[in-house]
Image (cartoon, helix red, strand yellow):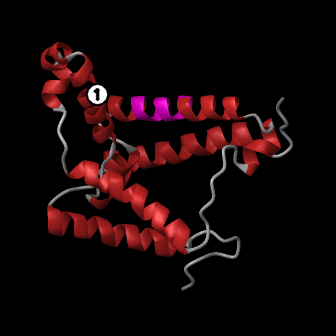
Amino acid sequence: MKLKTADGGWNPYLAGAMTGVLMILSVVVAGKYFGASTTMVRAAAMIEQKVAPEHVAKAEYYQKEKPIFDWQWLFVAGVFVGGLITSVAFGDFKLESVPPIWKERFGRRILPRAAVAFLGGFIALFGARLAGGCPSGHGLTGGLQLSVSGYVALICFFVGGLIVANLVYRKGARHG
């Protein structure tokens, strides 16, 4: 089995198998399932603790999700560092403010791209917290546990992604 596909992407079967092995090792070695969105909440609480500590102390949500540095911080940092190392090692690393597919559809302006990226990230994080977990938490971990709700969540993530990608990047659509 080849590591990369003809178009330069990772082989999805190999990447999926590697993710599955990593998830199993995470549970066996650390007793923890994948998840990342709680880290963002805790980071926000840590920042807020510096600005308005009385609010963090009184907020009911922060009693449940305490602003602590824990294993999830290391997980999120590891995702970033691992992705960086892998992209450099395979020669895929590049800094670009506007990806080529965005330039083709919407032009070279950085501000609209940054605004859409920020809005998309905000919506994803809001949805993840509203659902009580992120796609990796619900989809991957739920699937590993054979949870019906995990599979429903995973299907919804994929369908939503397909719809949005089709609306934004469908062939022949030229905006602005």
Residue at the (66%, 50%) spot, across then down: 96
Residue at the (17%, 38%) spot, across then down: 68
- Camera-side residue: 8 or 173? 8
Determine the image quadrant of residue 30: bottom left
Look at the picture and state if 62 lies above or below 16: above
Is residue 45 one of those drawn in magenta? no
Q: Is residue 170 visible?
A: no
Determine the image quadrant of residue 88: bottom right
Please give the range of residues in magenta.
119-126
Look at the picture and state if 56 lies above or below 135: above
Indicate the quadrant containing the C terminus: top left, top right, bottom left or bottom right. top right
Residue at the (50%, 35%) spot, across then down: 121
Q: Judge left or right: residue 175 versus residue 15.
A: right
Residue 153 location (% of width, % of height): 40, 44
Q: Which amino acid type is shown beneath numbered disc 1?
A: Ile
Residue 174 location (% of width, % of height): 85, 36
- Camera-side residue: 16 or 92? 92
Look at the picture and state if 160 lies above or below 27: above
Q: Using a 10 Å C-alpha cutoff, classify the residue at mark 1 as few (fewer than 14 neighbours), some (14 to 19) or many (20 or more).
A: some
Q: Judge left or right: residue 34 versus residue 163.
A: left
What residue is disc 1 on?
Answer: 47
Judged by its main secondary structure, the magenta piece is: helix
Judging from the image, what secondary structure is the residue with disc 1 in?
Answer: helix
Residue 36 location (% of width, % of height): 32, 46
